[in-house]
Amino acid sequence: MPEVMEEPAITKVMFSSLNLDPQILRAVEEEGYTEPTPIQAQAIPHVLAGRDLMAMAQTGTGKTAAFTLPLLQRLLPHASSSASPARHPIRALILTPTRELAIQVEESVVTYSKHVPLRSTVVFGGIDIKTQKPALMKGVEILVATPGRLLDHVESRNLLLNQVQVLILDEADRMLDMGFMPDLKRILALLPKQRQTLLFSATFSDDIKRLAQDFLINPVTVEAERRNTAAENVKQSVYLVDQDKKFSVLADLIRSRGLNQVLVFTRTKLTAARLARMLEKDGIAADAIHGDKSQQERIKALDAFKESKITALVATDVAARGLDIDQLPLVVNYELPPSAEDYVHRIGRTGRAGASGEAISLVDDKEERLLKDIEKLLKREFPRERATVTSTPRAHTTAAPEPRASASHRPSAPAQSRKPAPLDDWFHKPYEPSPTATAAEEPSCFRQNKPKKEIAALLGGLSAKR
Ligand code: AMP
């Protein structure tokens, strides 16, 4: 049984008391962090002490720094300014379930290591493996990877894992959900037995516990957030909307609030693709990320969203996993997720690192059971308000659009003030995946196939009334 640590008096822990090198602290300070988040305050001392760790923390809790900062500290004695690749063996391996998360984690590693001479790189599927080889050949101490692509590199003899001292499994629950267990086992067989292993997971399912039993030695368990509790700083509301009215309600919401950035979740990639397209047609700059999008397409969409070039990013649960977007004010559940735990993940995209956020769920009568599951999980009931629409969305009319009241809110998004094109046949055609799509690094089991009255009170009224 893993040892469960009591939560320390978190408020009293400061970065300066964590025994981190001044150069690491400098990078932390430059990021503007004033004090460790709860998961950082709890995990860092154990990682520095060399313990194996099971940490329950979802994205948004500061978990990346919780493992990266002490990792850098532990690798510092091996830092070398030599140009020789032999002096830069892979000493730490960070595995993530998705390409997006891999990229984000490596960005954080680069940020936190900017004043220490440790090298890192990231490898993930969906792009030409040859482009990743030069960085590996130069030698890196820290490698961030998705499992499938890592094994591709192993097979191509582009890297060796026999000097790995620290293994980090990030979002381990999602890795298992995505069917990465066989890949994980193969990778673990290539690592030295003598190593430190850190497992981060948003949930501690029985499968995760089994994984920990098999691969961790006497781990300390830390738990920054209680199981399946949603962030308290996220305001959550539920609106009852018939499925065929949801689009109008969403478009109304974006306009009436003059929103710059809204992350919209759908259950399937088909709905994600269509919804993004409909929003675009309606004059709201939008894009979708889902399993059929290539890596380049996903990165492009995410970057455009982060830079506020698009207003709405429509995402499926898997594609959005691990997304870190600073100051994201609003998440909309266009459809509730099939699993209540995914609801917690979704709304964790807003209200990050202590900022306040908001999550709005548009719920059709048929989704009532899913809503009940969520309420059961969160141990709370949401008041339901019925939503209706005040205006006809532009995608549903060929009439010339009226001037947008909210246009002045976002001069940086020209697409939003574009005149919508007339409806085309696209909406009536069956969905076709993008020809450039590739899911090279994803296991095959993961490839998604599954996946009136004025209601002013509802949308425009929401912000005005509070
Ligand atoms: P993560 O859970 O690692 O995805 O981190 C979520 C966000 O919290 C990122 O944008 C980090 O830059 C930010 N963050 C991490 N640690 C801190 C901290 N100690 N204080 C403030 N923000 C932080």
Image (spheres, rainbow, N blue to C red):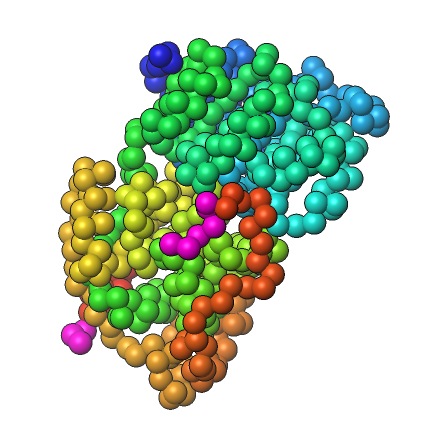
**Image quarter for residue 377?**
top left
Residue at 30 percent of width and 79 percent of height = 392
User: Is residue 392 in view from this perspective?
Assistant: yes
Q: Quadrant of residue 226?
A: top left
Q: Quadrant of the C terminus?
A: bottom left
In the picture shown, does residue 339 fall above or below 24? below
In depth, the one of 399 and 19 nearer the eye is: 399
**Was residue 452 drawn as part of the magenta stretch in this picture?**
yes
Looking at the image, residue 217 sits to the left or right of residue 453; the answer is right
Residue 426 figure quarter: bottom left
Q: Residue at x 52, y 72 (%)?
A: 415
Task: Name the residue: 44% across, 48% down.
Answer: 318
Q: Where residue 240 sits in the image (x, y, percent)?
A: 20, 61
State whether residue 56 appears in this view: no
Q: Which residues are magenta?
A: 445-454
Q: Is residue 448 magenta?
A: yes
